Image: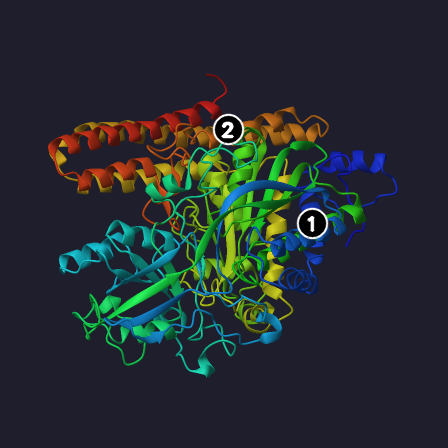
Amino acid sequence: MIKALICLVFGFAATVLVSFLGAYHTAHPAIQPGVDTPEEYKRTIRELISSHVKGENIIANLRAITTEPHVAGTEANRRVADTIANIWRTNQLEHVHFAEYDVLLSYPDYNNPNTAEIVDSDGQISYISEGVSKVILPEEQGAPGAGVRWVAYASNGTVQGDLVYCHQGTEQDFEYLSQQGVSVQGRIAVLRYGGGFRGNKVKNAALNGAVGAILYSDPADVARAGIDDSHVYPATEWMPSTGAQRGSIMVGDGDPLTPVYPSKNYTYRARTVQQAKDELIIPSIPVLPMSYGDVQNLLSQMGGRRVPTTWQGGLKNLTYRLGPGFVNRDLQVRIHVRSTLQRRTIRNVIGYIRGNQEPDRYVILGNHFDAWVYGSVDPNSGTAVLAEVGRALTAVINETGWRPSRTIIFCAWDAEEFGLIGSTEWVQEHADLLARRAVVYLNVDSIFGNASMYATAVPSMYKAATDAAKNIPNPMASERQANRTTVYDTWVRSFPGKFKSRPDAPDMPVPSGGSDHATFINYLGIPVIDFEYRNYTNYDTYPLYHTLYETHTLNEKILDTNNFAVHVAVGQYWAELARMFADSPILPINVSDYAKAIADVYLPDLRDALRQAQPQSELKIAFDQLNFVEKAAARLVQAAGEFEPSIDEAMEFFEMNPFDQRQISAVNERLVAADRCFVNPRGLPGNPTARHVLFAISKHDAYSGKVMPGVYDQLDDLRDAKTKAERQTAIQRLAQQISIVQYSIECAINNLADII
């Protein structure tokens, strides 16, 4: 392994040629890298960075930031921010500082937990729920108030009524209840976690007239091996009967009082709390989360007809029933939610490795650090790794003199759990600058398994995400023994690819919501890769998600027992992606993949959807627009193919003239500009923060990504139209949204062309 490498002056490590190496050796005769080819140089840098990512350092980082519960806006979380900043400064990141915002947050009464009661008509109480999860490991989980069960932004108050079991609380679930003659009007909805964002569940319940809601995790989802002690935490990763998932039930991202603009102390609050409630951004009903152990006491007494087979859960010896109410009609449920809304200051932590050739081009790495309790998995597994990625990169800089060409920005976000608030406010504050300078955003929220890498990404990132994974050793011995020697080998086997134009790529769905990458892609069009390690191909999270039990024992003794080998692999992958984007002469942005995804996947799917829409006799203008956009997409595929020789020519020129970067810069400008073409500054109708024409968060589920949201929203409106006038309006807007997609495609074609 070499001890000193080139690029003190030149940042383009990946593809320099012998002439470049010779020039460097002449300028720095004491540094003799001994590499014969650019590929050897790239491999040496990658291997050196990877060798510096150490499991013991990640463990130390994790323990340092999970010693106490640290909800956003609290003094405890300020201490965590200070700890992160100090670690980063020790690791020699540059310009480490805080970015502060004044935002609306929500808190429970830690001294008076939320509860549910069973009461009779005389007010006699026969049952009270625990309200606090049982502490299992006192030395890790015993902080005052740590076990209190709550969800953020729940309305304060007490309500009483009959229960209705609403399954996962989707729009379809409430439609089924209506069909069965079961109403939640004036009643309390029991909502099962899974199948979507909890905030959408509560919103749907409120829209259907519920006066309160109970959220719970069913053992069919979180205790699949059984609920006896030998099958649940701390013996395994499955949830014990006292566990409860916390979380936010705000629908939307960013501070709810300052839409579109950053929530600085000088910003006028354009929305009041009451307006946020009126717009169903934050709920007007009390909501509390319960354990499945507590919920069993309620569901076991339910009356009404049996639920459909697909709604039946895993509580033992219990037939799930819809309600409304109990078999004993004299009994009802009363819930007490003690909640306050408070303006608090949050602090993002920002640090840099400044590029030496293109310092105004940003490769952004991000993870949030606020947690519902201790947060050892979500999010601080990622926080601990991010700090080690920074240390590994600066160690190589110090050892060799190498420095990336472009600036790498490290971001630890605050208040993500409340609704991506820290990252959203930062993006809104620096929107113009980031739109011009940012190259890519690379996000890790949590490392919650050891089976396989998993990622969501925009199509222009497929190749880079795949190539990087092929260079990272497989952290699992069982996989290596099966001859799956790299992270890529297991990933592509666990999640086989569906993109015909890039058959070697694992399946990478479009970016979803629920983590800090969302605002970067949806508001500014910055390409993103959001990645994690997980255990299940049919379960999107992990059983102990947002519970008291996310302390370091879970990470170290259950999820990643071999000196944090999986955490190390995630760090190596993160660092390799950062190196590729920060140091490759040509940015690894693939416009051909983007064009083919539009032409070969998104538009054929849209044509199928249009063929299924009714009434077909009135859809001619929409089909006419689709014909236009399909032709434009074919031209974009052609333009992207014709642009590829320009990339080769720029590289050839650079290899012969390593001191002249003009052609390289011109190519990179076009690659970045083509991505930005798909941002509509006007946003979606009624949602100015959803500006990406191709990708957005589903309005029905804030966890889910959606392709061509403006188009499909109008198809939804067409489906729901009751009159001819409503149908005509929906069809006209549908044609307009298809036309906006075409406008974006034409923009990308023009950006790739030599002339206009």
Q: CA distance from mark 2 to mark 1?
A: 34 Å
Q: Is residue 506 above or below residue 633?
A: below
Sort mark 2 into few (<14), some (14-19) or many (20+) by Cα contacts within 10 Å: some
Could one spot residue 577 in this view of the protein? yes
Rendered position, 651 above or below 67: above
Left or right: residue 172 compared with residue 655 = left
Q: Residue furthest right?
A: 30
Quadrant position of the N terminus in the picture: bottom right
Three-letter amino acid code at the position of disc 1 = Ala
> Which residue appears at 31% of the width and 29% of the height?
629
**Left or right placement of residue 58 versus residue 697 in this view:** right
Label disc, if present, on residue 606 of the rendered structure:
none
**Picture residue at 51% right of the left edge, 53% below the top:** 531
Q: Secondary structure at mark 1?
A: helix
Circle number at residue 673: 2
In this view, 213 is above or below 358:
below
Judged from this view, the residue extending furthest toward the top is: 756
Q: Position of residue 504 (x, y in %)?
A: 46, 51
